[in-house]
Image (cartoon, rainbow, N blue to C red):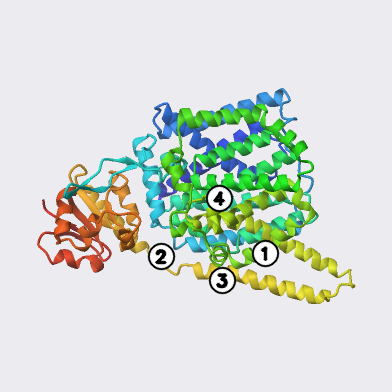
Amino acid sequence: MIEFISSQILFYISIIFLLFVPGYFFMLAVWGKENGFSSIEKTVLSFGSSVIIVDFLMLIMGRLDIPLSKVSIAGSVFLFSALSLSLCLIRKKIGAFRKNESEPKKTGFSYFQTIAIISILFLTVFIKTAYLTNTVFPTSTDLGHHMYWSKVITDTEKLPTYEESDVIASGEGYTISEPEAIADFIIGEHLIFAAISSLSGADFVSAFPSLILFIINIASVLAVFALALEIFRKYPQGVNIAIAVLFFIGPIYALSSPQAKFVSGGVIGNMFGNFFIPLALLFFIKALREKKSVLLATAMFIVLGLAFTHHLSTFIFIFSLAFTFLLFCIFNFKNLFSHIKDWLRLLFSPWVLGVLAFGIAMVFLVHTPSYLNPSAVDTAVGTPSKSTRTGLTFSQLTSTAGQARMIFGLLGLAILLFSKEHKKYGSAFILGWAVALFVMSLKPSLLYVDIPSNRIASYIIFPLAILSGFALIRIFEWTKNSLSHQSLLINPSYIIVMFFIFAVFLTQGGFTDNSSSLSHGGNTQSAIQTFHASGYLADFADKEKDVVLKDHNYLTADAWIKLYFMNGYNYPFSRGFFKRYEDPIKVREQCTLQMISFPSSTEAKKCFDGTGTNFLMVHPQFDGTQFRKTRNFWQVYSSNELTIFHKPQ
């Protein structure tokens, strides 16, 4: 009991130390204690910059061949924090903070606004926690793949080399290829999990990865709230708009993608992207409004961290920024020259040039992201190559975003577009963000985007939530003002009744979605059997001689099996989904299908001989019969959910 309590204390201390401490001291070094940021802005900036700083520290140590051990990780974070604090004290002594302070907040929250914010956040956390209670156990395929690479870092104390072997044809037979590089993973997705595991000793096959993703998800909600406060800061109802945004991004559709479902699903890159994008936009808007180069440098530092974390999110951010620039130029064409002068003054400042120099050094001298190779670029850019990349229908996009958010979001977009506020920086950024995602989701061919459309569409909920909150409060304002204008053709009381009926109807849709998403029971027991069987086989299998093949169709949490062997990303090999073997565009190897589905066939025998496969992990009900019918396989392990067969050589 004492050991469990101490391990939990160490785990939470590690989270605070890695996810908040370096970012907080970084913030002190740049702005000082009296920086004008709100508590919410300080929280999300501390969290976001901490993740980026830990990633960069580990990348630099890896480049210098310093082992990524518990001591080196903790020591580097402590040293960075101490240096940041020292720099803070020095800069305070020479009076450097006065010129870098952000514009102070003039108003806070009223009593009722504070109650509303706390209530919405509590409801958001409650709904997400209720869902994750039955889904937090490590069963997700994506999360299993990611945690393999994080475990590689903790086991080897080195940065991973992203490569895999595969079954290939060799003459008339088959063999296992030499490891080849893969560009599917980005280093920033794995470093922070490896750091937390190294310091706390937390096992990857546990709830800890999902807990970290849950923290990221809550941080993204707070980042969107902070962004809404900044966008509508000078509006008479700005705080109320931000609270409405918090409601649309919090409890409404709280479980849909990319929220709690992405937490349990282990979609790490999207989770980080949906946090860093609004955080970067927040500081871009603050920098342009206040004309402070240090704020622009901070925004660019966040984008640099995003670039080392997730390529799709970076790709979307670039398009959003491009659309924002285009719209702002159109809206402010008459005064464009004066704005350009302000932008150039900010860009060619020591702060911004310093971040650019640091970014160039990181990319070319420390670590080049895997997606910057030509083949990876060709995969994401060009004419859509598959039906899943040609764009969604509007109905499909509405289903992804949620009906309430889509309707109110489109209303907000139209209201903002035709209002006098559309010329402002905040309006241009939210409009550019939303329009870019609409085009990329519905008509990707217009931008030569060759990425699965449903993945892009999952990003649209955040700009739609902001536009929805804006529309809701604006409609409420118009309805309220109509009470004092009896000359209107429509009766004011009728408007009020219809508005609230409409709002309640759409809000109910979000909670209905939450209700339908709640799991009545997890598959924890099945996963435990998978882990037990994996540990059993890993204990006596010879990693140099034995080759294991598992099934992905019927086994629970099969992606986590590789964490017990740690013998390569594709070890054990896997029989994938059946439709994978019928792909008319890309010819797939058939060995992994033949060796499990038809183990006695001539083709399967060639596969067994060529690959040396001698252990098979399958579901006893769906795939046990074909092995029991022949004497060529011995059953060496059996449970209700998984059976292991051995093929003597």
| Numbered tag placed on residue 522 in the rendering | 2
Name the kind of residue labelled 4 in the image. Leu
Query: How far apart in space, not on screen, are marks 3 and 1 (Cα)?
Result: 17 Å
**Can residue 37 be seen from the camera position used here?**
no
Residue at the location (71% across, 26% down)? Answer: 96
Q: Is residue 540 left or right of residue 406?
A: left
Seen from the viewer's position, the closer of residues 243 and 12 is 243
Kindly identify which residue carries mark 4. 447
Residue 253 at x, y = what percent? 57, 64
Name the kind of residue labelled 2 in the image. Gly
Query: How far apart in space, not on screen, are marks 2 and 3 (Cα)?
Result: 20 Å
Kindly identify which residue carries mark 3. 512
Query: How far apart in space, not on screen, are marks 4 and 2 (Cα)?
Result: 41 Å
Would you call the spot at circle 4 few (<14 residues within 10 Å), some (14-19), or many (20 or more)?
A: some
Res 505 → quadrant: bottom right
| Numbered tag placed on residue 408 in the rendering | 1
Residue at the location (84% across, 69% down)? Answer: 482
Q: Secondary structure at mark 4?
A: helix
Which is nearer the N-term, disc 3 or disc 4? 4
Asked whether the beta carbons under mark 2 and mark 3 sit within 8 Å of each other, the answer is no
Residue at the location (27% across, 51% down)? Answer: 573
Query: How far apart in space, not on screen, are marks 3 and 4 (Cα)?
Result: 35 Å
Name the kind of residue labelled 1 in the image. Phe
**Can residue 363 be seen from the camera position used here?**
yes
